[in-house]
Amino acid sequence: MQPPETIDAGDLVLRRWVPAYAEEATAVVRKSLPELSPFMPWATEAYDLAASRDYIVRSTANWDEGKEFNYAVFTAEGDLAGSIGLMSRMGPGTLEIGYWMGTPFTGRGYMTAAVRAVTEVALGLPGVERVAIRHDAANGASAAVAIKAGFAEVERVEREPEAPGETGVDVIRERKER
Ligand SMILES: CC(C)(COP(=O)(O)OP(=O)(O)OC[C@H]1O[C@@H](n2cnc3c(N)ncnc32)[C@H](O)[C@@H]1OP(=O)(O)O)[C@@H](O)C(=O)NCCC(=O)NCCS
């Protein structure tokens, strides 16, 4: 079973990505490159409308195949502020959350609220036993979001760094209860 295409997260609304969001997404990503680039390998000076459209095309295909469920995050004012997704890549029974927030919208508790809302949805899906968040050990803001949303550390794993701010040590956190 798939999650809903729209999720209410208090002041925010999460909506499945559609091509119409590409221009606004490109603008907010480009405005946020200094904060996104340390931990998001795709967030480089080369990021443009084509890259945003490509992300949405891939997100649409992955959603239809049941692999990933990616949402654009909208504020109450209707601004596209960021992105959050549920990914099946950690294997059966687990959905992993990935996210970013545009710099003009950070520090307001938005991503914590979005994580809480998608976790509630994910743990209600048949066959989902846990929700995980995986972040680099140097990513203090991502760790803060995960901790505030009730995710406890369960493991640390080493991998090749992919973005300039990464140490190569991933912290894996999980939640099993709604
Ligand atoms: C991580 C991110 C999504 C947080 O979004 P947000 O909407 O600002 O999150 P919230 O406002 O809900 O919470 C942010 C928390 O991080 C804290 N924080 C911010 N920068 C921090 C840092 N360098 N070290 C430690 N904590 C930090 C804030 O103080 C806040 O905690 P508080 O409410 O206890 O004060 C955003 O910073 C981001 O997009 N970062 C770049 C992309 C990224 O790293 N994505 C995650 C990859 S795993």
Image (tube, rainbow, N blue to C red):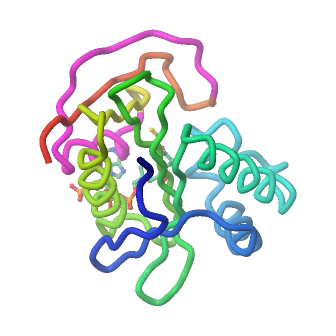
Residue at (76% x, 73% y) in the render? 23
Quarter assignment of residue 92: top left
Closer-to-camera residue (121/139): 121
Is the residue 175 above or below the residue 78 in the image? above
Is the residue 127 above or below the residue 45 in the image? above
Residue at (56% x, 74% y) in the render? 80
- In the picture, measured across the screen, residue 107 lies left or right of residue 87, that is left
Query: What are the residue bounds of the magenta stretch?
Result: 139-162
Is residue 53 covered in magenta? Answer: no
Quarter assignment of residue 102: bottom right
User: Whole-percent x and y of residue 35?
Assistant: 55, 52
Is the residue 57 above or below the residue 158 in the image? below
Is residue 150 covered in magenta? Answer: yes
Residue at (83% x, 58% y) in the render? 48
Q: Is residue 102 visible?
A: no
- In the picture, measured across the screen, residue 49 lies left or right of residue 15, that is right
- In the picture, measured across the screen, residue 38 lies left or right of residue 18, that is left
User: Whole-percent x and y of residue 69?
Assistant: 52, 49
Q: Is residue 152 visible?
A: yes
